[in-house]
């Protein structure tokens, strides 16, 4: 039994969205898993303080996103190493539907910080300031990164008639 | 004719629908708790100046097998805690988060900022955070404050300040330009730029003029005294850059951008920063393409252009750094020497953003570009966590206001009126 009762429910409730967000930012499932796990560990280490915040999710998100961005795609990061125990099951890779999606591919092609801004804005629906908090940058940087990202995406995707659908 | 779908709508729907199909699995809470306990134990051990160095090791330990491996391959020790904090007199205008700050040469101007509980992260707040119009000036030499005239509009964190002579120029990132006469304690409006400004997050000035980049890549120049705008000739270096920022220096006017044709749609090739120089008469020089995607026009140290960012760019070929510096005298770009690993941060320190000459505060560190040293700022004995305003003055870092993250989202009493000064 956990000595901090709230952490268990927080973990269960917050992890799915945080994992999806981090995955969307990195495009790397394993890296996202690791970054989110580390972020939760840090939250647990400071739980007596973190749980008093009105939204502990923001704390964990900030750690996870920055950890993931900082370590993305290092070969050593992916290397197999012994672990104390195996997870109950191996999570599925991203669904084919997602990988075939033109919008998803265009977002993944963005530079990392622009991609993070787009995901936090349009998936997590965070404000400019909240994104700045999460990424550890100024709101103005978020604004300029968002503008650059949207300009790139408009070029790549265009503004489609919904009847046209997206080219898969 | 059917309505067209905006890119924003498409992003919302496709990201939401697509990511809903990603099975997050159950995770391993027990492993997270186990790692957390190890971190907590180590935190209890470390105190004082050695804390950060020890915690760098702890982070590697708690990062689990994969993160731990990555860190062993590329170790980057956390710099030691340095300098000292001392409290200054509290602001006379009351608690604030994210006030706008500027250094006049003798005083720090602290303007506007949030006065009510900020919208919590991830919350859907209908109303915008209210911002204040009042402000005050702080003299660190005497540790005294004086109130200044209220601004004509609320001043929020999105305003960019720069001091030009005895005038503070403020830009709201869109269309509004304001001037504050420091001697006369009066506010006035300045004319809007002749074209849409590309908001780089900073405002830069030289010799009484403010320089901004238009969204079409043209450098625009504001003379606050004459209340007039002019433009530099089009940057005719080839190929034309997607320009995003400008940095005026006594070594020339630098435009930073990227070659839009360099990075194909594969998402792997870094759009490395390219810098052009205006020598006062022509766009005379293009420096060799750098190895960073950072905005090198963010800051001028007096000898170099610096992008202070300790992250690397995930997903791009070679995992390039997002920070770096360019020496225009030699034309050489380099990584930030001795930059600590982003993961070495403890998460407990303060992260004020401010730059003056070779001294830059960001990411929880102070980087001295002349000495090529990094110092961990740590934190003073304060409940404040973030959303402070910060500015350098006379070699000291002054930090104002902010919020206690644990309480401020629910209770405005968690907003601070504190003043803290960090000295190297």
Image (cartoon, coloured by chain):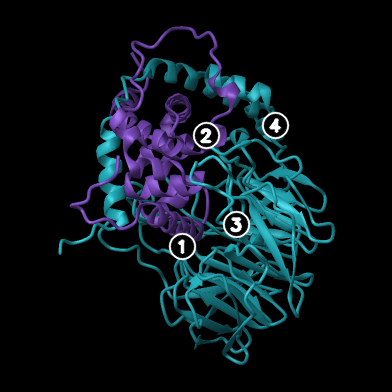
Chain colours: A purple, B cyan
- Residue B280 lies, in percent from the top left, at 75, 79
Nearer the viewer's eye, disc 4 or disc 1? 4
Separation (CA) of disc 2 from disc 3: 29 Å
- Please state the chain letter of the residue tagged with numbered disc 2 in the rendered image: A
Res. A67 mark = 2
Q: Marks 4 and 1, Cα distance to the nearest angstrom?
A: 36 Å
A133 over B72 or under it: above or below:
below
Residues indicated by labels 3 and 1 sit on the same polypeptide chain:
yes
Q: Are marks 4 and 1 in contact (CB under 8 Å)?
A: no
Q: Secondary structure at mark 4?
A: loop
SS type, badge 3: loop
Q: How far is the residue under mark 3 from the one under mark 4?
A: 32 Å
- Residue A155 position within the rendered picture, expressed as x and y whole percent measured from the top left: 41, 57
Q: Chain of mark 4?
A: B
Q: Secondary structure at mark 1?
A: loop
Do marks 2 and 3 share a subunit? no
Task: Determine which residue is flagged by label 3.
Answer: B259
Kindly give the residue lying farthest to the left in the view shown. B1
Tell me if mark 3 has few (under 14), some (14-19) or many (20+) residues whose alpha carbon lies within 10 angstroms of its own: some
Q: What whole-number distance in Å separates the C-alpha atoms at marks 4 and 2?
A: 14 Å
Q: Pointer 1 indicates a residue of which chain?
A: B
Between label 2 and label 1, give the one nearer the viewer.
2
Residues under numbered marks 2 and 3 in contact, where contact means CB atoms less than 8 Å apart: no
To the question of a shared chain for discs 4 and 2, the answer is no
Q: Specify the label residue B76 is tagged with.
A: 4
Residue pointed to by mark 1: B96
- The residue positioned 25% from the left and 46% from the top of the image is B13
Quarter residue A97 falls in: top left
């Amino acid at each position: 039994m956990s000595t901090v009762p709230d952490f268990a429910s927080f973990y269960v409730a917050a992890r799915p969205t945080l994992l999806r967000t981090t995955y969307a930012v990195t495009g790397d499932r394993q890296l996202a898993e690791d970054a989110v796990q580390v972020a939760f560990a840090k939250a647990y280490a400071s739980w007596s303080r973190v749980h008093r915040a009105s939204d502990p999710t923001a704390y964990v998100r900030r750690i996870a996103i920055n950890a993931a961005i900082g370590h993305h795609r290092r070969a050593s990061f992916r290397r197999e190493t012994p672990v104390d125990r195996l997870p109950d099951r191996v999570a599925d890779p991203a669904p084919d539907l997602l990988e075939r999606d033109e919008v998803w591919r265009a977002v993944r092609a963005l530079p990392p910080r622009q991609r993070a801004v787009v995901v936090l804005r349009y998936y997590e629906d965070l404000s400019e300031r909240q994104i700045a908090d999460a990424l550890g940058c100024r709101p103005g940087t978020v604004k300029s990164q968002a503008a650059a990202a949207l300009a790139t995406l408009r070029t790549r995707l265009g503004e489609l008639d919904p009847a046209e659908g997206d080219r898969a | 004719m059917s309505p067209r779908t905006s890119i924003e709508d498409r992003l919302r729907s496709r990201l939401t629908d697509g990511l809903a199909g990603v099975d997050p699995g159950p995770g391993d809470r027990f492993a997270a708790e186990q790692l957390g306990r190890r971190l907590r134990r180590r935190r209890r051990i470390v105190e004082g100046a050695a804390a950060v160095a020890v915690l760098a090791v702890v982070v590697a330990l708690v990062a689990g097998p994969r993160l731990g491996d990555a860190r062993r391959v590329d170790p980057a020790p956390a710099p030691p805690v340095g300098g000292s904090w001392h409290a200054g007199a509290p602001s006379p205008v009351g608690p604030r988060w994210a006030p706008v700050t500027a250094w006049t040469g003798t005083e720090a101007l602290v303007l506007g900022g949030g006065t009510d509980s900020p919208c919590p992260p991830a919350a859907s707040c209908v109303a915008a955070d209210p911002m204040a119009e009042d402000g005050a000036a702080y003299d660190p030499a005497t540790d005294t404050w004086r109130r200044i005239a209220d601004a004509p509009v609320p001043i929020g964190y999105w305003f960019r300040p720069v001091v030009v002579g005895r005038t503070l120029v403020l830009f709201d990132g869109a269309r509004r330009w304001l001037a504050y006469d420091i001697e006369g304690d009066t506010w006035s409006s300045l004319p809007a730029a002749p074209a849409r400004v590309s908001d780089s997050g900073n405002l830069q000035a030289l010799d009484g003029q403010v320089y901004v980049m238009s969204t079409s890549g043209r450098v625009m120049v504001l003379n606050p005294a004459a209340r007039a705008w002019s433009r530099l000739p089009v940057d005719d270096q080839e190929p034309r850059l997607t320009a995003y920022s400008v940095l005026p220096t006594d070594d020339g006017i630098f435009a930073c951008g990227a070659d839009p044709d360099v990075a194909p749609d594969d998402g792997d090739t870094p759009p490395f920063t390219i810098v052009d120089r205006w020598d006062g008469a022509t766009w005379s020089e293009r420096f060799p393409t750098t190895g960073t995607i950072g905005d090198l026009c963010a800051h001028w140290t007096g000898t170099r252009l610096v992008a202070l960012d300790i992250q690397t760019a995930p997903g791009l070929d070679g995992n390039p750094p997002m920070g770096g510096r360019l020496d225009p005298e030699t034309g050489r770009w380099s990584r930030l020497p001795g930059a600590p690993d982003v993961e070495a941060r403890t998460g407990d320190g303060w992260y004020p953003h401010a730059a003056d000459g070779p001294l830059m505060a960001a990411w929880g560190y102070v980087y001295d570009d002349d000495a090529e040293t990094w110092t961990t700022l740590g934190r003073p004995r304060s409940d404040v966590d973030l959303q402070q305003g910060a500015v350098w003055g006379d070699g000291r870092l002054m930090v104002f206001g902010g919020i206690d993250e644990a309480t401020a989202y629910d209770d405005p009493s968690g907003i601070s009126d504190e003043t803290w000064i960090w000295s190297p």
